[in-house]
Image (cartoon, rainbow, N blue to C red):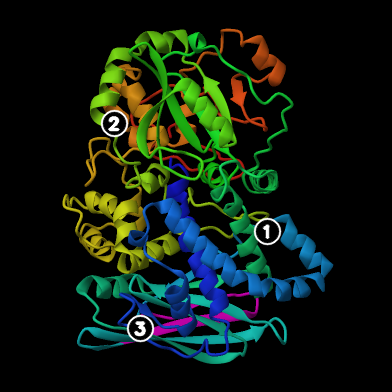
């Protein structure tokens, strides 16, 4: 699974959706406009276009993903601040609502997928909190390469006099936003310019996707701000501020069901002689990013590393990125004592999982080191396939919000985001998903756009979810080499050292998440832990060497390796039930 920077990209895109929601509430939000000179996709909403123009800068304008996200998030939070005083007044007028909002304050700006409506198809119906009887029908008029779609909504049976429903209407070619306060018939227009055959295929096959924002504006602004505050202070500091750690502990508890206790002993030094090649070091930094990854994966770590003895010296080998708290970019090796010093300064919580005697006997250190030096060291961080190490199922990897867990990030929203991002900022799509999607339709040169990939996938009888769950292959090479996120590098190191034996060619490390790595039954649970480890964390089956908070690794050391493992695993909080064959 990814380290921090990959998550930054997707978090930024979700922030964009809600920030535009608030912007579109301005008085002229009903005025439709096209911004053909600025936008490569159709933005049928003036407020949304204004947001993009004022806040968003493409990834290519920055030296790193971290810089891009920090600048973007600063712009979004600056936008949100003027709304906060109004928001607080509204919420504080109703203490019950305030309490409910405070219990689960994060990610409430994610919209719910309602339906898709294709031109000339029968109408679709649903019930919304305001208009309990809602329906929509679409008609398209084509004029050469230009297409106008009119979505007619009929909204009846309002639940109260002053209620309203707020919607996002989108295809992979464009989007608009609308609020509805009055019953009756309403028309939403989406005007698409210069549509390609692939764009038209998406419209006629998948239609206009309809999403509804769940939270009212005051609560959603609050949620946007609270979610951003999980990240911002940790992005701007080498050490994670204590208040930020507390917010993230609350998030892990209420969203992922993961409760971390405060430790009194926070540093348990290991003698280097106790560490062997192939040993696993798991990391959790309470910085918004690792906890978000843990929530999505069902893991107790957000980053993973592996130890290697090289020419008589002990190194920690990892795939990560340069940031405010980490000095080196890409796949790297760091002398152990130096790594420990950097980990302390970065507020890392770290566990050491030594290989069992049996696994150590299988592991060929020389071959692993040779592979690391010849195939991995110096490669950039593995952005290209990060999403595909995680997406194993149609929808059971996409997190759902507590308490009811009925509002979930939908595959339809992910597809819309992917298509629009590809049109708006190709540097992100090429880095994050486009090359991997091209490979899944057998197109080795990664030059098909996202919507063109889906057009090609349709010819092969594949839809979005069927395409994204195709297992990643270790042998795939991207434009900058093999693509390995943190746990993939760990797994590939084990694989190169022969740890998987007869299954070596039947296990795809690029399908692993953090949980898949540390749940392998390859670790030492028979050798008594050092006395210092027991003193710091009585009863724990592994040794935590750093950190203020006690790490919890559910599923630790529980699965024997088997062919095609980790290729079809759900990961839904808070139970994270996984079938035995995943």
Is the C terminus in the top left, top right, bottom left or bottom right quadrant?
Answer: top left
Between 297 and 311, the one lying in front of the other is 311
Residue at horizontal 36%, vertical 53%? Answer: 63
Instruction: Name the side, left or right, on which 312 lies relative to 268.
Output: left
Q: Position of residue 290 (x, y in %)?
A: 54, 43
Question: Which residue, given by chain and number where applicable, does mark 2 sit on?
Answer: 376
Q: Position of residue 432 (x, y in %)?
A: 34, 52
Question: Which residue, given by chain and number where applicable, does mark 1 sit on?
Answer: 105
Earlier along the polypeptide chain: callout 1 or callout 3? 3
Q: Is residue 71 above or below residue 149?
A: above
Earlier along the polypeptide chain: callout 3 or callout 2? 3
Which residue range is magenta in the image?
A: 121-140
Instruction: Name the side, left or right, on which 503 lies relative to 555.
Output: left
Q: Is residue 63 above or below residue 190?
A: above
Between 404 and 312, the one lying in front of the other is 312
Q: Marks 3 and 2: CB-CB under 8 Å?
A: no
Question: Which residue, given by chain and number where applicable, does mark 3 sit on?
Answer: 35
Front position among marks 2 and 1:
2
Is residue 133 one of those drawn in magenta?
A: yes
């Amino acid at each position: 699974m990814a380290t921090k920077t990959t998550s930054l990209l997707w978090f930024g895109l979700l922030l964009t959706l809600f920030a535009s929601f608030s912007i579109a509430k301005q008085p002229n939000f009903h005025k439709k406009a096209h911004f053909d000179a600025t936008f490569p996709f159709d933005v049928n909403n003036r407020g949304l276009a204004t947001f993009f123009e004022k806040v968003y800068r493409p990834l290519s304008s920055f030296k790193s993903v971290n810089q891009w996200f920090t600048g973007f998030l600063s712009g979004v939070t600056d936008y949100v601040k003027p709304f906060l005083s109004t928001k607080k007044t509204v919420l504080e007028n109703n203490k019950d609502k305030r309490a409910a909002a405070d219990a689960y304050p994060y990610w409430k700006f994610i919209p719910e997928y309602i339906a898709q409506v294709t031109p000339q198809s029968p109408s679709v119906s649903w019930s919304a909190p305001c208009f309990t009887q809602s329906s929509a029908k679409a008609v398209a008029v084509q004029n050469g390469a230009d297409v106008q779609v009119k979505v007619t909504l009929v909204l009846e049976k309002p639940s109260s006099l002053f209620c309203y429903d707020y919607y996002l209407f989108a295809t992979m070619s464009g989007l608009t936003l609308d609020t509805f306060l009055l019953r009756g018939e309403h028309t939403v227009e989406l005007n698409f310019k210069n549509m390609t055959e692939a764009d038209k295929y998406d419209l006629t096959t998948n239609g206009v996707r309809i999403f509804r924002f769940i939270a009212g504006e005051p609560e959603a602004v609050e949620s946007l701000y609270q979610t951003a505050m999980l990240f911002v202070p940790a992005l701007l500091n080498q050490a994670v501020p204590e208040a930020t750690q507390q917010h993230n502990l609350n998030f892990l508890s209420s969203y992922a069901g993961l409760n971390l206790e405060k430790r009194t002993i926070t540093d348990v030094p290991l003698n280097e002689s106790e560490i062997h090649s192939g040993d696993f070091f798991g990391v959790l930094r309470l910085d918004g990013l690792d906890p978000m990854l843990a929530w999505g994966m069902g893991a107790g770590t957000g980053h993973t590393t592996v130890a290697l003895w090289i020419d008589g010296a002990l190194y920690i080998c990892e795939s990560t990125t340069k940031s405010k708290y980490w000095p080196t970019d890409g796949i790297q090796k760091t002398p152990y004592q130096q790594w420990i010093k950097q980990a302390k300064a970065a507020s890392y919580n770290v566990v050491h999982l030594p290989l069992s005697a049996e696994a150590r006997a299988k592991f060929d250190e020389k071959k692993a080191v040779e592979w690391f030096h010849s195939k991995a060291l110096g490669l950039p961080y593995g952005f290209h396939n990060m999403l595909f190490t995680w997406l194993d199922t149609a929808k059971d990897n996409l997190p759902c919000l507590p308490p009811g867990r009925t509002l979930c990030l939908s595959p339809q929203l992910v597809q819309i985001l992917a298509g629009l991002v590809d049109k708006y900022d190709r540097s992100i799509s090429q880095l994050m998903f486009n090359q991997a999607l091209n490979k899944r339709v057998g197109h080795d040169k990664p030059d098909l756009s996202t919507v063109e990939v889906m057009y090609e996938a349709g010819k092969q009888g594949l839809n979005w979810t069927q395409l994204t769950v195709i297992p990643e292959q270790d042998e795939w090479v991207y434009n900058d080499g093999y693509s390995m996120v943190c746990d993939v590098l760990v797994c590939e190191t084990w694989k190169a050292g022969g740890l998987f034996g007869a299954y070596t060619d039947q296990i795809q490390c690029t399908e692993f998440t953090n949980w898949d790595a540390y749940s392998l039954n390859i670790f030492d649970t028979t050798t008594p832990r050092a006395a210092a480890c027991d003193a710091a964390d009585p009863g724990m089956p592994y040794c935590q060497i750093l950190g203020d908070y006690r790490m919890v690794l559910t599923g630790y050391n529980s699965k024997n390796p088997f062919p095609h493992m980790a290729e079809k695993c759900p990961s839904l909080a808070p139970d994270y039930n996984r079938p035995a064959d995943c």
